[in-house]
Amino acid sequence: MANITIDSVSIAHEYPFEFLRDGTEEPNFGTIKLFNSSQRSPYPDYADVEVDINGTTYEAIIQKDLVTRTALGKYQHDIILAEVVLKLAGYIHPDRLFTTIDGSKITYLTQLEHILISVEMNATSPFTIASATQTILGVNADEKEYSGGDLLTTLTDMFRSVGAYPTLSLNNVIGHELIGDLGSQVTITNSIGEIIESDISDYAMAVHSKVKNATYETDLINGGTFYPNATDGVTPRSSDAKYSDSEAEWQLDSGIRRFIDVRMKNLQSQTEGTLTAADLTKWIVSKEEWDGLAIERTTTTLYAGLYRNNTLYYTEGDNVIKNAGVRYNNSAFPISGLGQQVIDALIHSFWVDKNGTDSEFNNQTLKEMEIGFYYQPIRDLDVRQERHSIDKVVKNAVILNQQKDSKLELSRYGEANKSLINRLGNDKFDITVRYKTDDTLFDLYDYTDEDYKIIKIKYLIRYRTVDVTYHLVKGSSVLNPNTQINRSISPFTITKRNILTCYVENEYIEFSRTQRTDTSNVQGLAFRQILMNAFAYSGTQDKPIYNAQFISISSGNKYINSSVQRIPMGTSMVFNMQFQSPSVAGYQLVDDTGYLGSRLKPIPYTDEYGQVGDARVYFGHTATIDVDLHPVSVSIATYYMGGTLLSYDLNPNEIFGKTHIQHCITSESNLIVGDFFAKNNSLMRELGLSQGITVFEYPTSIKHTIDDKYRKSGSTGTGTVSLDITGYEYLDVSTTSGTNWVIAKSTAPYDIYFAFNNQGSNLSRIYINLMKTRPNTETL
């Protein structure tokens, strides 16, 4: 009766199971329950799924899989299926403003083709466009801005302009469905159940909704300093009538979304005196995150990371911070069986995190603590759409969102808003039909002779039969989950502004026990020498990236210098260059012919139409600068990154920006690349001198995690690290114990470059592979 395939493998399943196809608000197809003995782990997110019912195949992807062990060697999978088009939400593209190309109008198809090129700069696009979709998009487009959204949001906005919404197949073909499209006229007979519903809500002509937990990102609240005081502050208190340390909690003045900053004042240490402000933010988390933490019973490893023992928590929407005085059993108190209060363990963790040791820890008195809380409050908002006249809605209201709607979409909004209100009040009914294996099922958007349309189908599939429940409504267009009207409305405005279009090019530095062929756009040896300069310091290689050179083919091969902004972000290194105004790269001082003195001449980086087609960007240390020609220069002699000719397809009034990101990744599950590696190398900053670097060895019981910034105490010895100074292609690590090791700064606070947890196979050589695309990942 039915067959289920996941990533091209037929999956065993039990009957009955349910399957939902929804053409209205829900973005998922429902849940399928599978039972098998071969798949213990969850099926991966976004895995391809095909469900065949009575010879018709429906495509979907996995949104979530919950696995439950039901018996020895038997597992139940509760799989939530989603529409394939939701994959597009994982792709981010630069802001784009489309007006004309070479002074002429362009089509929506041209806009889409340019956007797909800019999604994955310097990589082959995984997407193709269906021929029928190319036809429907091949009409002249209005001026259109796509900003602040992912590819799904952008395509939804673009397709609305032609009365459609986007679809995606499992083989990555972008297609479409028309809004309000009709299927075939059908007659439903042989029903085994029927529910008919009618109400009077259409007379209200209104849609009411509530926005839960709304937050303004910049709306920060200072929770004040909380300590006992007769006239000021809020004391730690407990839920009991009589105060108890074990029930201690702080009560703020509003609902909490998340903490921005939590500082403790006057924190007493053993020898360093009193800290004016100790950052405790990482040890105060939401209840949901706290529930995922472990309880640590061994005090020797308690301070390796976040545990329930050293973390306070709050419930989102609540205004109470809890867990401060609770004690957890641990091995340090074998007689009483009680550990430290959580607040003491928290302070203990702060000192270990700060100094790599707990020598400065000093017990505090709970009631005397001063803590400043900065957090974002949450609020509930009511939104009401009210309609007294459909005409007024059509003329004066549109969706307010991040996209800029065109004039053509005003009528679309009015019809959809009317449709939403009408569907609440019009007749609707569910009818259930039982089918055998050779029967033909109806499809979404099929309709009856009474103008009822099928907008939702629920399948209950048994071994030899399937019960299908059709949900039908009258007087309603189909409101796809990506195009439905559920936002507040505002007067329609058209604004023109210059768009900063920042193209992002990602490349990867892979640390691996396997050597690969380099595929990146960096200068191999020179790049590695600068990248690894901290390990084999040389003043001649101490050359951070400061300069970018832009070469536009469209503007006649002009070499234009620009400065570079360098930012280490975690284990990634970001290099950004941009121009400050549309079409002008800077001003050149030239002789003022016929007059005395000189004048400033604007230097364009675009062609005569204010566009940029193909261009190159080089990133390097210094540029060849002539003060009489600046910012124009001759070709850069040496560079470290870039140089590939790329098609940017920049439109008039877009300001060019280019970001090149080097991500530090590893193919070894037990190898950790520390944040300090990205911060402390000659690509990002001048080192100025040789760096002290040491290999610390650890017993098997001590492991480092990705959250550790500094090496832990408890090392059992030291090893050596050496760099291949011929080709700079690998690091060699020598240890005596052959267990866990950390490459860290030789002096406190012992910042971590690399850490390795030995799980049975030691890692003594680390290869440095320069990759254009991240290895071992799927296209989507």
Image: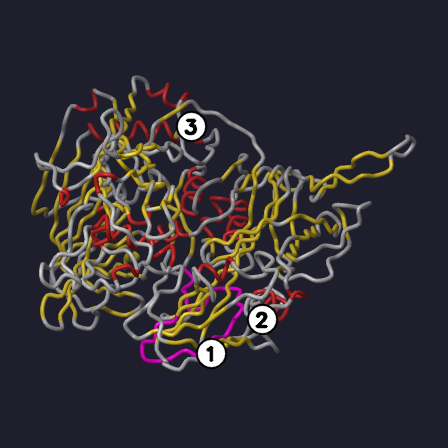
547 with respect to 475 (left or right): right
- Where's the C terminus, which quadrant? bottom left
Cα separation, mark 1 vs mark 3, equals 63 Å
Q: Which amino acid does label 3 sit on?
A: Leu
Quarter of image, res 489 = top left
Residue labelled with disc 2: 536
- For the residues carrying marks 1 and 3, which lies nearer the camera in this image? 1
Residue occupying image coordinates x 75% and y 57%: 635
Residue carrying label 3: 410
Scheme by which the image is coloured: secondary structure
Q: What element carries label 3?
A: helix
Q: Is mark 2 on a helix, strand or loop?
A: loop
Circle 1: residue type: Arg
Left/right placement of residue 432 relative to residue 162 reads: left
Q: Earlier in the sequence, mark 1 or mark 3?
A: 3
Residue matched to label 1: 765
Q: Nearer the viewer, mark 1 or mark 2?
A: 2
Is 763 within the magenta?
A: yes
CA gap, disc 2 and disc 3: 64 Å
Q: In this view, does 764 lie above or below 272?
A: below
Measure how far apart labels 1 and 2 are at the Cα level: 16 Å
The image quadrant where one finds the N terminus is bottom left
The residue located at (21%, 65%) in the rendering is 3
Is 623 in front, or is 459?
Answer: 623
Q: Is residue 733 visible?
A: yes
Choose the circle earlier in sequence order: 1 or 2: 2
Q: Which residue is drawn at 36% across and 33% down?
A: 220
Residue placed most toward the observer, 75 or 379: 379
Give the extent of the magenta segment: 756-780
How would you rate the neighbour count of disc 2 (Cα within 10 Å): few for under 14, some for 14-19, many for 20 or more?
some
